[in-house]
Amino acid sequence: MSHPNRFFVGRLFAGARVATCVSTLVATLGVALPLAASATEGGIGRPITGMQVTPYGGVVPPTSDWIISVATIYYEGSLGASKSIPIAGQVTAGVDVTAVYSIVNAVKTWGITLGGWNFASSFGVPLQYTDISSFHGRLPNDNATQFADLFFTPVIAGYHLTKTDHVAFSVQIYAPTGAYSTARLANAGQNTWTFTPTVSYTKLLPKQDVELSLNYGVEFYTPNNDTHYHNAPLSVLDLLALKRFGNGWGVGVVGGYIQQLGHDSGGLAEITGGNQGHSVGAGPMITWSGKVQKTPVSASLRWVNEFNVSNRPKGNAVLLSVSATFQ
């Protein structure tokens, strides 16, 4: 599908056209680098500013397909030396972080329609390279390439409000399966279960070939059993505006706002005060969708600069994703 919006009105469920729409929808679904939240343990958390929203994020079609995607985030940021954070069971002042997080993600659409609702499920296997150091701190530099926490979404339920307005509901779950040790700085895993109730909404403007999408979720963490640290919930809002062209390309802007709800508790949070934090970021995005032989394929590239940040690392993130739909 080289220009999906042009055909969406009246043809939302048109076979291969829908398949490419889904391919774009899940191109970054589930990408969540454990590196850029608010004042969570280690000064880090799962979401990266502006990285959760996806094209067609609110659309779940009635087709029965497998969508396989590969996505990579490069993130580089730092937290000033004046800020103390709990990490590796100690308190240190300031961190520099570089990470490359790659995930292979699979989505299965169910091919079921119930009263205007359609459904899908997804799971992902991530691998992460982390290089982290504490300047003016106690801990030595550390780097590692490790498996990060597995994630899965048992049910994604989408409802078609109109032919141009769509909403989807889900609960993403991260399991504490990634590498984690209190003896080191570079941990790809977080040693917590995380549950994220999420709502996604997509508004299509077919005459202009424009899409407006948002993604909002709240992340709830279980306590870290090794450190007894309990991260406060995180409110995560991402917005996307995208203009598509007849040759399959699209350009747009993406932004995000992360806000910690309340203070951390337990463990070293009692020393650092469990300070609330937030981040705001925005940047450009380009997309492409089409076919490779007969397989619908889509790709997306975005850059987000964090420009308003407190009590968390501040930096830049680049996301590249490619996905294919198999009918």
Image: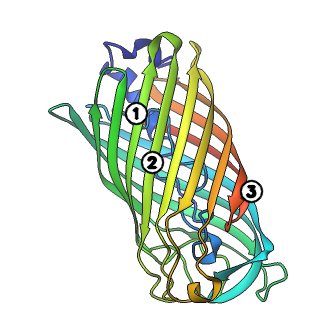
Q: State how the image is colored.
A: rainbow
Q: Position of residue 62 (x, y in %)?
A: 25, 31
Which element carries disc 2, helix, strand or loop? Answer: strand
Single out the residue that lies furthest toward the top. 207
Residue drawn 58% across the image and 42% down it:
321
Residue 283 to residue 31: above or below = above
Q: Which residue is mark 1?
A: 22
Q: Quadrant of residue 86?
A: bottom right
Comparing labels 3 and 2, the label whose residue is closer to the camera: 2
Q: Which residue is mark 2?
A: 216
Residue 159 to residue 95: above or below = above
Sequence-first disc among 2 and 1? 1
Sequence-first disc among 3 and 2? 2
Residue type, label 1: Val
Q: Quadrant of residue 116?
A: top left
Comparing labels 3 and 1, the label whose residue is closer to the camera: 3
